[in-house]
Amino acid sequence: MGLAPILAPMIGGQILLFTSWRGLFAILSVAGIILTALAIIKLKESLPVKERSEGGLRSTVEVFVKLMKHRRYMGFAFIQGFAAAAMFSYISGSSFILQDIFALSPQAYSMIFGLNALGFITMSQVVGRLSDRVHEEKLLVIGFLVALTGGTTLVSAAFLTGDLYL
């Protein structure tokens, strides 16, 4: 999973040399069908029957209500939600901005995207190693401040220079 965000855009960029974006979706559809079939056939339930919960809509709603009343949890959930929203905004908008506005080739875009993914993976590993020594709340606050600083720097650079390479 760690290599997927780096390799996928690079492989996709290379496939675009031979097909269109529609061809990419066809390839991904076939891969999805194959992986779904393999999961159905090969992956078996590992939790013993007696340890499985009944679940259901009522118990799910009860858990959600309990979580929504927990202020601290909701604060952390909002921070994580906004961080994920920022990441997916980048994922969905970066190809348009970098390829259409800054005229990067799909291959150059895939390299930039891969470099960003490598940074993301590296920092995830650093946080994982720090989690034994630094309290998770402190790590969350530091991560939030780093993301806020990076976002502010990016927006400032876009308005001040409009240059890709600053």
Image: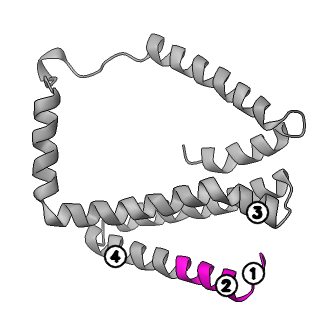
Residue that numbered label 1 is attached to: 162
Q: Are marks 2 and 1 in contact (CB under 8 Å)?
A: yes
Residue that numbered label 4 is attached to: 141
Q: Quadrant of the N terminus?
A: top right
The amino acid marked with disc number 3 is: Leu
Which disc is residue 98 wearing? 3
Which secondary structure, mark 3? helix
Q: Left of 109 or right of it: where is 59? A: left
**Mark toward the start of the polypeptide (2 vs 3):** 3
In this view, the residue farthest toward the top is 41
Residue 132's place in the image compared with 56, above or below, is: below
Residue that numbered label 2 is attached to: 159
Q: Dividing the picture into quarters, in which one does residue 111 lie? A: bottom right
Which residue is depicted at the point 90% across and 34% down?
A: 18
User: Magenta stretch?
Assistant: 150-166
Which residue is depicted at the point 34% across and 66% down?
A: 79
Say few, some or many: other residues with alpha carbon within 10 Å of mark 1 (under 14 / 14 to 19 / 20 or more). Answer: few
Alpha carbon separation for disc pair 2 and 1: 6 Å
Alpha carbon separation for disc pair 3 and 4: 30 Å
- Residue 78 place in picture, x, y as percent: 31, 63
Q: Are marks 1 and 4 in contact (CB under 8 Å)?
A: no
Q: Dividing the picture into quarters, in which one does residue 105 lie? A: bottom right
Q: Dividing the picture into quarters, in which one does residue 7 lie? A: top right
Instruction: Please name which of the two marks, 1 or 4, marks the residue nearer to the observer.
Output: 1
The amino acid marked with disc number 4 is: Val
Instruction: Please name which of the two marks, 2 or 3, marks the residue nearer to the observer.
Output: 2
Which secondary structure, mark 2? helix
Say few, some or many: other residues with alpha carbon within 10 Å of mark 2 (under 14 / 14 to 19 / 20 or more). Answer: few
Q: Nearer the viewer, residue 122 or 129?
A: 122
Can residue 135 be seen at all in this image of the molecule? no
